[in-house]
Structures are given as structure tokens and as C-alpha cells.
Image (cartoon, helix red, strand yellow):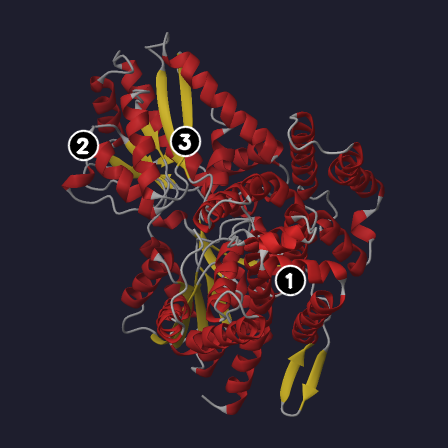
Amino acid sequence: MTFRSCALAGAAGLAATLLSLPAMADITIGIIASLTGPAAALGAETRKAVSLLPDRIGDEKVTYILLDDATDPTSAVKNVRKLISEDKVDALLGPNLISTAVAMADIANAEMVPMVSVAPLDVGGDKRGYVFRSEPSADLMVQRIVDDMVAGGAKTVGFIGFSDSWGELLLKALTRLAENKLRIVAVERYGRADPSVQAQALKVIAAKPDMVFIGASGTPAAMPQITLRERGYKGRIYQSHGVTSKEFLRVGGKAVEGAVLPVGPVLVAEQLPDTHPAKTSGVAFVREFEARHGHDSRSTFAGASWDAWLILKTAMAGALQDKIAPGTPAFRTAVRDRIERTNGLTGTNGVYTITAGDHAGYDPSAIVLVTVKDNQWRLVK
Amino acid sequence: MDQTIFVLLAQDGVTNGAIYTLLALALVMVFAVTRIILIPQGEFLAYGGLTMATLEAGSLPGTLWVLLGAGAVAFAMDLATARGGGRRLPGRSLARSAAWNLGYPLALAALLTQLPLAGLPLAAKALLALALVVPLGPMMYRIAFQPVAEAPVLVLLIVAVAVHLAMVGVGLLVFGPEGSRTTPFSDAQFEVGAMQVGGHTLAVIGASLALIVALYLFFDRTLYGKALRATAVNRNGARLMGISPALAGRLTFLLAAFVGALSGLLFAPMTTVYYDSGFLVGLKGFVAAIIGGLGSYPLAAAGAVMVGLLESFSSFWTSAFKDVLVFTLIIPVLLWRSLASHHVEEEE
């Protein structure tokens, strides 16, 4: 798969250079993802979603240019400048991490190019006029965890998280939301590539929390849970929504049984009740996605990437109806204004209502809690 | 902190220390013989662990393509040297190069496609993983280091960094961004006094000790081992005695790759290994090697256990600053070493 996608990326790059010259009127969307570096697992999901994007919006041809940020804000900035100045993109999609997103956002804003981030960066305030996001904020997600903990009768909670900005973000959310409800009795940190988390697990167990929240992401999030279970911790363990795919279950095996986490609905699309707004679109997306990328290849990150495109597409279709030519500043501004009028757009991973005052616009009722049972994701009813 | 926790932490620290020991010894050995600070040492660990994981999943490891490619490049370079005149390679050594760089990977490819990979016993998979990763060592030396073998230490270091970056990139390509864990060599639990010792912990410590003894015997008792030691002491002198520096280099890299891949096999059941995991682990081995002054094997081993213990206990007391503490250790060590030892002029 990797060889082919590499060739695809190469072909896409070539196509981009060939097409960008004669086809001035075409729509160009620049995509930045972390294809290499520590966040490569997330970038891979965005790339999979991008490979499904249709090549037309209305009657207009769309060119996608996918560039790697190497999980590094400096390269993200360099590539965004390239996309804007050389490729004259009409909109930006991505990146995967807040750190790279923050760096990109300032440029998108200064150059007045609409950008829909797949990372949950803060999109409030005047400085983010052209910046939107499709990923729900950590606060919304952690809120669900705290509510569920309190409903489950917990009084104390232990935290083991990444010693990076993601772990910090989740800890801050937990500290704020758990105030007066739960006491945080242990806060421990670990690194993605650490050989063991024995010491941290022992310390958390020694503090005797009723439940534990693991603030990590992807497959590295399995390690603390494995160690906690090995050391005999019996309480319920919550994972964050950074755990987005089946890979986590593969690495975690038996130890992650019973883990509870809040996710965008796409991960359990088929199990959603018929009343859930994202059910139809989610199931359709998952079918198409897994037909292309294999059984159980779905992830919330792929869903969020798709939804970012959906937000752009809806706005662009509107701008085209107003007979505004792509590739012009007027088109970019029109797309931005249209995104601010996104009303109840149902994506694969949630429902979006974006206004001038709220550039995130993710409807929290779309979030679901899932648990791991028999090495499968199961919706918590 | 009570006694049980202390014992558990110490056990954890010693186990990780055993892994760091292996890497530190390999680093010291490579530096002594070739003056190369082998930054890509950790990559052998990642490749070893991930190759094992792919074999366990029952699919063909991407390492095979790397091996085939590297072998082809290494042979092409030998061929170019042979054709290029000047130092003419005799036909026999060219035939040997073809056998090792082309024949061996192809034979291994044939073997891998024929075997029912998923059904093999654990030991056979481990052997296959070693057979796939270890030859990358000599090939790496042939391709990247042999052409610049006489260059200053700094140039060699820069080449090592480049090789490291290339190997991480290739690792991402062949193994993908997600990590893997492998099955432990033993699930048994032993009661030693009041503490529980996992079978895998014993396997790690045992393998490290066995390897240290084996390396000692190799360097002390065999002709090749003595040749490597002679090269380490004085390159030109060894050359005058008929020891080929190219052979010494390839042999050292073979050993380094073996130690690296083996530590990968031991490491992968303990934690999830990613395509880029090798660097940080290798760096801790490097800290240990620095404690040994990049010259002493026993001091490097002691340093490695110290790094493991420090890491384990600092994870307990202040987990957010764990890596900071481990890497800060290098500053007092360097201070002490530079004050204690008299200044030696760089050879360049």
C-alpha cells in the first residue's frame, strides 16, 4: 500500500504541475498533512480520505495538491506559502496537529485563503477570520468522559498522558471540567517512544483512583492501559478521542477490553441508532472508504478530513452558483463567507453549523461513547 | 514508596538498561574500529522489531525489499570499483560480492515466499528476522562509509546522520506509520523471594549477558576478533600487518547490526515499536557509551544500567521531566571526563 500511495503522491504532484498552468479557471485545493514524522499515522488517514475526493465540484474541475509537513510547523509554513504563492490555491485543508495548524492559520489569514483544519485548533477571535475546523474541540470530548465518570459513581481520577501538547491539552480540559466533580489524584506523563510506563502506572495505582483517563493518541495510547492491567488495576479506563482507529485494538489486544472513549460517530457508523443525524452519511462513507482501503480501515481522522472537504465543497458550490470565477481573491472571500453560513451540514463525523461568531460549529450531540468488546468497537447506548 | 514499588522499578530499570547496554556496546565497538559514531544503530533495533512483527502477522516483511535494494547498490559499487581501474579487484572477490549482495537476498526471498510464515515457531521467526536485518549492516558500511573511510570523524558523523535519516524514511515506507508489539519469548512468571519476575525480563537480561560474554570471547580468542582489536588500536599498523580496513569495517557493522536487531527482538515485546522508535532508544545507548568515554566496554555497560535505573525512578518521581533528567546526565559526565583526563589532540 505504501509503495502505491507514494507513487500516487508523485503522480498527484506531477499532475499538479501539469495542470496548474493551462487550467486557470479550475478549483485548486491545497492539502497539508503529516505524512512523515511522529504524526505520520494521522497524516496517513488524511491521505486515505483525500484519495476518495471527487474531481469535480458542480461542473468545475478540482485539483488537489497534497503536501507533507513532516510533523514540523516550519515545513508546514513553507509548504503553505508554496501552495498560496505558486499554486494559487482557492482553499486549504488540514493539517493534522494543532502545532502545525497554528503556524498555518496565521498565513491563511494574512493571505486571505479559507482554511479548514482537521486539527482542533482554537478558531476564536479576530485573528482567525479565514480559519475553520472540522474536528470537535477537546473540551467537548472530555466533557463526555467527565459526565460518564460522574454517572458511573467515580470520585477520584488518575491521569496518564503524553508529555507533549496533546497530553497537556487533555489534562487542562480534564482539570477544568472535573472541578468540583472529581478529584484528580495522580498526574503522570510519558513519551510516545518510551520503553515502558511501569513507574507511571505504579504511581497511579498507588494513588488508588476510581477511574483512569489516558490522555494519549493512536497506538501509543495502548501501552499505559496494558501496563495498568498487568499491574492489576481494576477500575474503568478511559481513552481520549485521539485513539481513532482499529490499529489501537490490534496493538492493545486483550488489555484494552472495556476501554471507554468519546469519538466522532464515523467509527461505529453501522451501530448508530437510526435517529442519529450522521448515520446515513457515515455508513455511506465507511462503505466507500473500506472498499478502497480494506476492511476495518476506518478512522475518525479520515472522517474529519472528509468533513473538512465537505464544508469546503458546500461553500464552493455556493460561490460557483454566484458566478464567481475560481482562482480569484473574490472567490476565496466568497468561499469564506459561505462557510460562515454553513447551517446543519451533516458530515460523516458530525453535524456542522458554522457562523461568523463560531468557526468550529461542531454539534456536540453527535459525539458518541464507544467501548471495546471482543476486540471490536461497540457503541455505548 | 514502599519496597514492592522499589523492586518493580529497579527490575524495570535493569531490563531497559540491558537493552541500552547492547546498544552502547555496539556503539563503542563501531567507534573504536571505524571512528564512526553510529547514529543509525537504533534503526537496526526498529527494523528488527518491526520485521519480527510483520513475520508474526504472517506477511512478507518489507525489509526484504530494502535488503534486495541495498544488496544491488552494494554490488554495483563493487563492480564500479573493479571496472574503474586503479585498485583492481580480483575476479574472486567480485564473485564473493555477487554471492553476498545478490545471491543471498534472492535466496532469502525465495525462502520467505515458500515458507508458511504465520505457522512457523517463534524461534524460526526470530532467526528469519535476524537473517533479514543483519546483512543490512555490512551493506550499509559498503554503500555509505567505505568510500569515505579515511575521512575525519566529523565527516563520518555527518554521513551517519544522513544514513539515519534515510533509514527512518525507508522504515516509514516499508513498515507504515503504525507501530507493533510482538509476543514475548516467555509468558512465565517466577517468584524470586518477595518479587515477581517475568520470563521475558529474564530473557532480556540473559540474552544481554550471553552477548557480552560472546563478544568478549570473540574479541579475545578468534583471529577476526583480534584483527578488529588491532584495527581499533592502530588502523595503519593493522593495515601494514595485512588486515584489510574494509573487511574490518564490514565485520564491525555485521556485529553492530546483529546486536541491534537482537535488541529489537527483545525490545518489541516490551513496548510498541514504531519506524522511528530506534533513535531515542539509540540515543540513550549513546548516553551510556559517553559515560564509558566511547572507549570502555564495562563502563559503557555500567552506564547503560545507570541510565535504565535513572529513567525508571525519575518516571516515578517526576514523569514529565524523565527524558530531561536522563539526557542532562551527560553534562556532569562530560565535565568530569574533560577535567579528569588530559587533553588529547585530535588526529586531524
Is the same chain shared between marks 3 and 1?
A: no
Whether residues under marks 2 and 1 lie with C-beta atoms below 8 angstroms apart, the answer is no
Give the number of the disc on residue B41: none
- Report how far apart the C-alphas of labels 2 and 1 lie in the structure: 62 Å
Residue A178, position as x, y percentages in the image:
31, 69
Q: Is residue A379 above or below residue A88?
A: below
Give me the C-alpha separation between circle 3 and circle 2.
Answer: 20 Å
User: Is disc 1 placed on a helix, strand or loop?
Assistant: helix
Alpha carbon separation for disc pair 3 and 1: 49 Å
Location of residue B22 in the rendering, given as x and y in whole percent from the top left corner: 61, 66
Q: Tell me the amino acid under the disc marked 2.
A: Ala
| Residue at the spot of label 3 | A67
Would you name the residue on which mark 2 appears?
A110
Residue A225, compared with residue A219, is above or below; it is below
Q: Is residue A371 above or below residue B112?
A: below
Residue at the left extreme of this rendering: A126
Quickly name the residue at label 1. Answer: B229
Residue displayed at 51% across by 86% down: B6
- Which of the two discs, 3 and 2, labels the residue nearer the N terminus? 3
Amino acid carrying label 3: it is Leu
Callout 2: chain: A
Q: Is residue A95 left or right of residue B233?
A: left
Whether residue B253 appears in this view of the structure is no
